[in-house]
Amino acid sequence: MKTRVVLLTGYLGSGKTTLLSRLLVHPEMGETAVIVNELGEVAIDHHLLRRVDERTVVLGNGCVCCTLRGDLADELRDLLSRRDRGEIPAFRRVVVETTGLADPSPILYTLLGEPVVKHHFALERVITTVDAQHGLRSEESVKQAAVADRLVVTKPDLADPAMVMRELRRLNPAAEILESVLGDLAPGELFDGDERDPRDLVFDEAPAHDHEVRAVCLMFEEPLDWTAFGIWLTMLLQARGGDVLRVKGLLDVGAGGPLVINGVQHVVHPPEHLPAWPDDDRRSRIVFIGRGFTRDELERSLAAFNRAAQ
Amino acid sequence: MCVLCGVLLNDHWAEQEGGRRGRVFRGRLLNRVLAVYGLRLDDWSGRVWVLRDRKGRTAVVDNLGAVWVEAERLCGRPLDPLDADLIAALS
């Protein structure tokens, strides 16, 4: 069984370390290893703590998101071998806390692409903290929020979180949004529960401003041809990968259950077949978070590729 | 796995199913798209593809992601699936 990895990210001062310190106090967070970039503030007496220096290895043609975080891969491999030799206590989960300015894509690429790491570790969830006072204040913080599975709005006691919540729901409706004052969340609130069903999401249909990152949802009544979809998405990511921050969806490819697709920029998780649909609604739904495209453009293009496969 | 670096990872997410028949179908569909840009893709021994342009330049690619990297290089511009001319050509 693979060891689960949680990626905890968020902009500078958005409360990542506070959240992590409070979480680690809970007894159910036992058997957790923690990898951080900065030492000092995390209360980790009874936890394994490893520090890494950001070290990236640029692969191939230098695409930013497709860089291996060699530091992270080394640490994960080392944790694994020391656990197997009995030199450190057993752990069932690893929390990786990024720096505030970190681009999450290389970390996800490392977890999903490095041969040894992907064989032994599975990405469980990306959790992103966003400060209610300052919101999404930079390109990095927008990207961190776009790739999140759970968003934690921090410091709601210091500033009204309503505006940030609205902004986040517009940016990433697929993520559940929680509020936290000084990290007062139980581990179950962050780590348990299923991902949100794309069919239950509400999308803001107001036109996007120039360069605004936002979410759109494509919907198809007829089954999609998987080969056509793969060709279309790889072509789209090659042409516009920098602008497609996140892809997430349930596809009807004519099988008994849906096919789950999940990607961050150029990095796409291996697709997963679910055994059955939850109900009679079998329409494909694909959420795109990014900029420079509209829902109609994406739908028209994918439909043309799908027709070409018939 | 990664559209750009799938070569290194050797198990591209979009090519894990379908077997030999799936590969033949994928090649046929890819050629419909690539023909719009004056390119052609030939299967070579069921393991790699050879991409050619009309000037006779070739590139050997071993997964779907790499097809678009090399196609872009041979054409000298990004090949955008949202391009209205491509959509019209496929329709």
Image: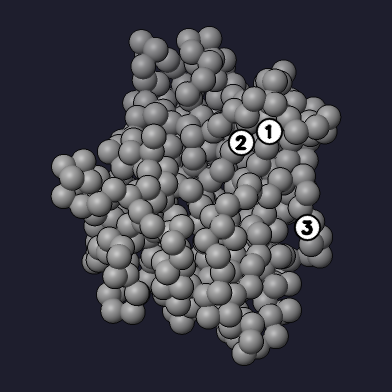
Q: Residues within 10 Å of mark 2 (few under 14, many from 20)?
A: some
- For the point 73% across and 41% down, the residue is A285
Residue type beneath disc 2? Val
Q: How many marks?
A: 3
Tell me the residue that label 3 is attached to: A203
Q: Residues within 10 Å of mark 3 (few under 14, many from 20)?
A: some
- For the point 53% across and 45% down, the residue is A263
Q: Please indicate whether residue A296 sits to the left or right of residue A157 in the image.
A: right
Choose between B27 and A152: the one closer to the eye: A152
- For the point 62% across and 50% down, the residue is A193
Query: Label 1, label 3: how many angstroms apart (C-alpha)?
Result: 18 Å
**Which is nearer the N-term, disc 1 or disc 3?**
3
Specify the quadrant that holds the C terminus of chain A: top right
**Which is nearer the N-term, disc 1 or disc 2?**
1
Provide the secondary structure element on which disc 1 rests.
Answer: strand
The percent coordinates of residue A9 (x first, y second) are 46, 66
The percent coordinates of residue A275 (x first, y second) are 64, 25
Query: Label 2, label 3: how many angstroms apart (C-alpha)?
Result: 20 Å
Tell me the residue that label 1 is attached to: A251
Choose between B19 and A276: the one closer to the eye: A276
Query: Chain ID for label 1?
Result: A
Tell me the residue that label 2 is attached to: A260
- Please determine whether, in this image, residue A254 is positioned above or below residue A267: above
The percent coordinates of residue A195 (x first, y second) are 63, 48
Query: Chain ID for label 3?
Result: A
